[in-house]
Image (cartoon, grey):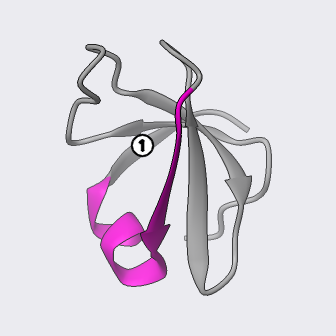
Amino acid sequence: MEYKIGDIVELKKQHPCGSKIFEIIRTGVDFKFKCQGCGHIIMLERQKAMKIIKKIIII
């Protein structure tokens, strides 16, 4: 599945702030996500990111 910058996605794992909703702010070899609950930014390897993305909420 293709993901683009600006997509809002739901992840399987919850962020410590309690939110599962993240915005994709970088794609490529690594994915960068911004938590919609607290604004914290996390970076994951592409393989790991593809496994934990549950669904796209807003394209």
Quadrant assignment for the N terminus? bottom right
Q: Residue at x 60, y 57 (%)?
A: 32
**Residue 4's image quarter?**
bottom right
Task: Give the image quarter of residue 49.
Answer: bottom left
**Tag 1: Cα neighbours inside 10 Å, few (<14), some, or many (≥20)?**
few
Write down the quadrant of residue 44 in the picture: bottom left
Check residue 51 for magenta coloring.
Answer: yes
Residue bearing the label numbered 1: 55
Q: Is residue 34 left or right of residue 12?
A: right
Residue 37 horizontal/vertical position (percent): 48, 12
Is residue 50 highlighted in magenta?
A: yes
Residue sitting at x 59%, y 22% = 39
Q: Residue furthest bottom?
A: 29
Q: Is residue 58 above or below residue 4?
A: above
State the extent of the magenta-drawn residues as a range: 40-52
Q: Quick check: 34 above or below 3?
A: above
Q: Nearer the viewer, residue 39 or 53?
A: 39
Residue 7 lies, with reference to residue 32, above or below; the image says: above
**In what element is the residue under mark 1?**
strand
Does 34 sit left or right of 11 as displayed?
right
